[in-house]
Amino acid sequence: MILGMSISTFTTLHVVISLSGIFSGAIALSGMLGSGISGGWTALFLLTTILTSATGFLFPPFVFDPPRIVGVISLIALAIALLALYGERLTGAWRWIYVICAVWALYLNVFVAITQAFQKLPFLQPLAPTQSEPPFFVVQVLALVIFVALGIVAAKRFHPDVSVAT
């Protein structure tokens, strides 16, 4: 049991939160690419991505393993993004710091989703049963390249009217 739920129910909740973070993050990122910001989608992205990392710590075994390291890195990026957006209101360098941290947190969510997909989905498992095979590597590198490119473009284009969004 985790938080009074069966592991299966908790896992489903964790996946729904994670997918919500990815979906809302994609919308928030598209806003950044268009130099805009949607307060609602951005807040939903930040909240669900924080919850994704936080709930990930509740799964056994309770050791400091690679998934938890990714969770810590994500939470650090999200804390900086929150400071940049709500504390510093994206002034000066905080604008691009926010973009980098938000895009990095979204990428980490997608990185974990890809890993989980190769572990859990029957049609992907045979392609990379140990996540050390070329198909897994290619997909992860492709995702990283896409996010780096989107992050660079977003950092250049993102100049929102923050007073509307926060």
Image (tube, rainbow, N blue to C red):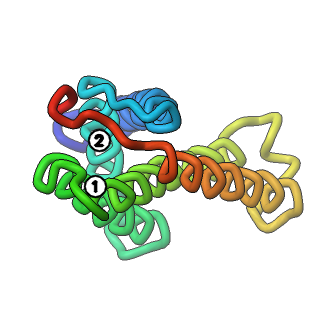
Residue 22 appearing in the image: no
Q: Of the residues shown, which amino acid type is indicated by label 1? A: Ala
Task: Tell me which corner region of the image, top left, top right, bottom left or bottom right, holds residue 148.
Answer: bottom right
Query: Residue 88 at what x, y percent from top left?
Result: 14, 56
Q: Which residue is mark 1?
A: 81
Q: Is residue 58 left or right of residue 3?
A: right
- Residue 47's disc number: none
Query: Residue 119 at what x, y percent from top left?
Result: 67, 49
- 34 in relation to 62, above or below: above
Closer to us: 36 or 59: 36
Residue at the spot 46% in from the left edge and 27% down from the top edge: 27
Q: Quadrant of the N terminus?
A: top left
Q: Is residue 28 left or right of residue 47?
A: right
* Residue at disc 1, secondary structure: helix
Query: Residue 92 at what x, y percent from top left?
Result: 26, 60
Task: Tell me which corner region of the image, top left, top right, bottom left or bottom right, holds residue 158.
Answer: top left
Among the two numbered marks 1 and 2 on one chain, the one whose residue lies closer to the N terminus? 2
Q: Which residue is mark 2?
A: 46
Q: Is the Cβ of the residue at disc 1 closer than 8 Å to that at disc 2?
A: yes
Residue at the spot 28% in from the left edge and 30% down from the top edge: 44
Q: Is residue 112 left or right of residue 49?
A: right
Q: Of the residues shown, which amino acid type is indicated by label 2? A: Leu
Residue at the spot 69% in from the left edge and 49% down from the top edge: 146
Residue at the spot 65% in from the left edge and 47% down from the top edge: 114
